[in-house]
């Protein structure tokens, strides 16, 4: 049970960590000072969640495991994040759509985890809920601003929707770990809010004067450790210091 729970905690933390890293790449490169700071703060919020999940996972893993070894010293196939969060910062439209889809999923996932039979997970989710709501307000407002903005902003964000929305289906593909956690009352049945997720996404797209893409969902398996070509570059940056200077202390 401990091994599966540890992997589930890694799965929850990996999503936030990889997306938080993508956002950190934008520090100093936002379209305005206010937006730059907002994206950086969202990244910090996500890393706060990562620490909570990884600290719990480290306690389950024994003395030789720490939050740092979990974050920085695993091989690519042991990271269990969805492929969506790996997608690069092609332009501001891609940044916002990727964030919006993640935030919309979390708007269902976080309340569900607040009802977890695992008290630590429930507490982490309860602590995160205000951040989750703010993140969704932020990304939703930008979806509408870009969709109803200039011809270029509309074209760019529609292209981002077309490219990224098919990745979102992976959120709802239940892995063996997630099924076991559901049976134990620790995690939710993801299928229960899939329809509501897409309904809310469509609602925002309509308000933003954007259209739902007709392309089929992408068959990706990030939650089982099979990642896109982007993941290796992300880990190269994330792990460089720890691997170059093992057991370094600041």
Image (cartoon, grey):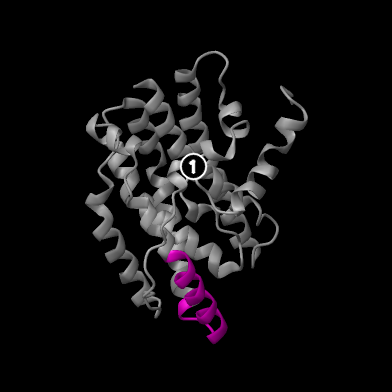
Q: Is residue 62 magenta?
A: no
Query: Residue at horizontal 25%, vertical 53%?
Result: 193
Residue at far bottom of view: 151
Circle count: 1
* Residue 47 horizontal side relative to residue 123, left or right: right
- Boundaries of the magenta span: 147-165
Residue 178: quarter of image: top left
Within 10 Å of disc 1 (Cα), the crowding (few <14, some 14-19, many 20+) is some
- Which is nearer the eye, 207 or 183? 183
**Residue picked out by circle 1:** 225
Quarter of the rendering occupied by the N terminus = top left
The answer to whether 211 is drawn above or below residue 22 in the figure is below
Query: Residue at horizontal 53%, vertical 39%?
Result: 77
Local SS, label 1: loop
Residue 164: percent from the left, percent from the top?
47, 65
- Which is nearer the eye, 37 or 183? 183
* Residue 120 horizontal side relative to residue 47, left or right: left
């Amino acid at each position: 049970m401990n091994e599966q729970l540890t992997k589930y905690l890694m799965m929850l933390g990996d999503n936030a960590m990889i997306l938080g890293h993508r956002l950190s790449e934008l520090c100093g490169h936002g379209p305005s000072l206010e937006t730059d700071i907002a994206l950086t703060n969202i990244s910090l919020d996500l890393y706060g969640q990562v620490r909570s999940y990884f600290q719990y996972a480290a306690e389950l893993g024994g003395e030789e495991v720490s939050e740092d070894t979990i974050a920085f010293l695993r091989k690519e196939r042991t990271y269990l994040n969805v492929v969506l969060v790996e997608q690069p910062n092609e332009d501001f439209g891609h940044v916002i759509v990727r964030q919006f889809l993640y935030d919309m999923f979390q708007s269902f996932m976080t309340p569900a985890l607040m009802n977890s039979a695992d008290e630590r997970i429930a507490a982490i989710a309860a602590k995160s809920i205000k951040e989750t709501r703010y993140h969704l307000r932020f990304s939703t407002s930008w979806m509408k601003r870009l969709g109803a903005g200039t011809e270029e902003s509309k074209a760019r964000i529609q292209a981002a929707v077309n490219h990224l929305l098919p990745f979102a289906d992976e959120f709802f593909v239940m892995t063996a770990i997630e099924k076991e956690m559901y049976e134990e009352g620790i995690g939710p049945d993801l299928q229960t809010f899939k329809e509501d997720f897409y309904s809310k996404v469509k609602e925002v797209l309509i308000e933003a004067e954007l259209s739902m893409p007709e392309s089929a969902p992408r068959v990706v398996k990030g939650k089982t450790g099979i990642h896109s070509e982007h993941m290796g570059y992300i880990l190269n940056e994330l792990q460089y210091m720890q691997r170059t200077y093992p057991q370094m202390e600041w």
